[in-house]
Image: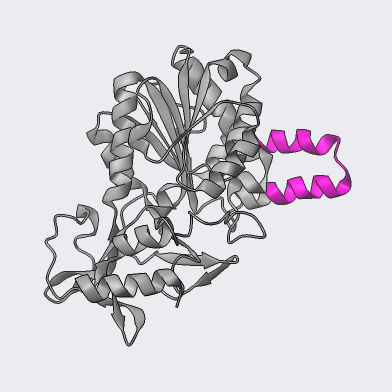
């Protein structure tokens, strides 16, 4: 077992089985052995590839989206341009380069990154060069004021709880330890249905549902800030538009799915995002939401095909093929196009943002 697995087993020995939410938080964020604390997991040499690493087109279009929203806000100067979980800084670098089409946008933007990993903070500094950057460990540390916030594949890694329906009601799935190995088991106590979304309370016997107060707390905080100070947020992640039953917790290592309990701290842990729950949290804070729409619809409406064509014009055959392959991966149904969803959060009186045209 890994050092973190040994530590988790000891915690379970002392305190009893732990909720999956605590296991996830420790596996990803433990200050010594957490997955995101000690490594750069991105790219072909890592464990997974995100959209900004696939093509510059993704970050460029998001940068233009942010610039348009900044203009719609009345071009505040200064304003906070924030990214949650910014990876290597690739998306932000591409967004700022594209946003430079409006020079005043780049001049007004104060870049704030919510990032806990020292390794990734170093990569972000390299990607963004001499530009002043403000780093934060927590979303609550972001300054008040007009803000445009980007969250690409951020919510999927926030801790979830799982509940399974039995003949007598719902029981929380826990992480225990048997014969020196971590395992999943059910809490014998019946859980009240209040933590569960109303849309899935009638799930069949044996069904598993997932809820995440960590995700809704983040969304509520973002929404409250933009309602108070003006702004917009763009959420891009994989998940479902409506609350639904299902076990979506997964671990990824070297681009392959692995056992979530086998080697905690060495594999990425994620679960599908419930966009309905995020939208409800935003509405409770007084914000307005648009979407979710598929990543295909969003990028197509922003003109990704046109951008791909312009990149291919003066490209070598190999470069042109790389652009074509990237476009396929970002937008096709059998790739990221349908599973990934996009949601915008704005103030109540905001107009419809680009990429969210009504069907």
Residue 349 lies in the magenta stretch: no
Q: Is residue 234 above or below residue 255?
A: above
The image quarter containing residue 8 is: bottom left
Query: What's the coloring here?
Result: one colour
Q: Where is residue 125 drawn, in percent x and y?
A: 60, 37
**Residue lying at 11% horizontally and 74% vertically, measured from the top left:** 168
Q: Where is residue 196 drawn, in percent x and y?
A: 20, 56
**Residue lying at 38% horizontally and 49% vertically, measured from the top left:** 241
The image quarter containing residue 260 is: bottom left
Point out the stretch of residues depicted in magenta: 302-327
In the foreground, 37 or 140? 37
Q: Where is residue 35 drawn, in percent x and y?
A: 48, 60
In the foreground, 146 or 51? 146
**Residue lying at 72% horizontally and 38% vertically, measured from the top left:** 308
Q: Is residue 51 above or below residue 75?
A: below
Q: Quadrant of the N terminus?
A: bottom left
The image quarter containing residue 102 is: top right
Residue 316 lies in the magenta stretch: yes
């Amino acid at each position: 077992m890994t050092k973190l697995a040994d530590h988790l087993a000891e915690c379970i020995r002392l305190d009893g089985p732990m909720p999956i939410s605590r296991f996830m938080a420790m596996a990803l964020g433990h200050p010594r052995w957490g997955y995101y604390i000690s490594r750069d997991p991105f790219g072909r040499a890592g464990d997974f590839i995100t959209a900004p690493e696939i093509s510059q087109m993704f970050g460029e279009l998001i940068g233009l989206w942010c610039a348009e929203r900044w203009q719609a806000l009345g071009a505040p100067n200064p304003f906070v341009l924030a990214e949650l979980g910014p990876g290597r800084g690739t998306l932000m670098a591409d967004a700022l380069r594209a946003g430079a089409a409006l020079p005043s946008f780049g001049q007004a933007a104060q870049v704030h990154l919510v990032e806990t990993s020292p390794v990734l903070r170093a990569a972000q500094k390299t990607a963004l060069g001499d530009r002043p950057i403000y780093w934060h460990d927590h979303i609550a540390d972001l300054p008040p004021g007009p803000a445009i916030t980007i969250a690409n594949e951020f919510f999927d890694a926030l801790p979830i709880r799982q509940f399974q329906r039995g003949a007598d009601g719902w029981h929380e799935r826990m992480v225990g330890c048997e014969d020196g190995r971590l395992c999943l088991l059910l809490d014998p106590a019946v859980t009240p249905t209040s933590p569960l979304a109303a849309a899935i309370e009638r799930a069949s016997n044996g069904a598993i549902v997932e809820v995440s107060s960590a995700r809704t707390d983040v969304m509520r905080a973002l929404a409250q800030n933009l309602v108070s100070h003006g702004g917009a947020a763009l959420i891009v992640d994989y998940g479902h538009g409506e609350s639904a039953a299902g076990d979506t917790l997964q671990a990824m290592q070297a681009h392959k799915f692995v056992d979530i309990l086998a080697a905690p701290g060495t594999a990425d842990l994620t679960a599908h995002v419930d966009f309905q729950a995020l939208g409800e949290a935003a509405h409770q804070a007084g914000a307005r939401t648009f979407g979710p729409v598929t990543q295909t619809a969003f990028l197509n409406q922003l003109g990704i095909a046109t951008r791909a064509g312009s990149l291919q014009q003066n490209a070598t055959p190999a470069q042109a093929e790389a652009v074509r392959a990237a476009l396929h991966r970002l937008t096709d149904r059998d790739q990221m196009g349908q599973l990934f969803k996009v949601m915008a959060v704005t103030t109540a009186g905001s107009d419809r943002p680009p990429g969210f045209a009504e069907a």
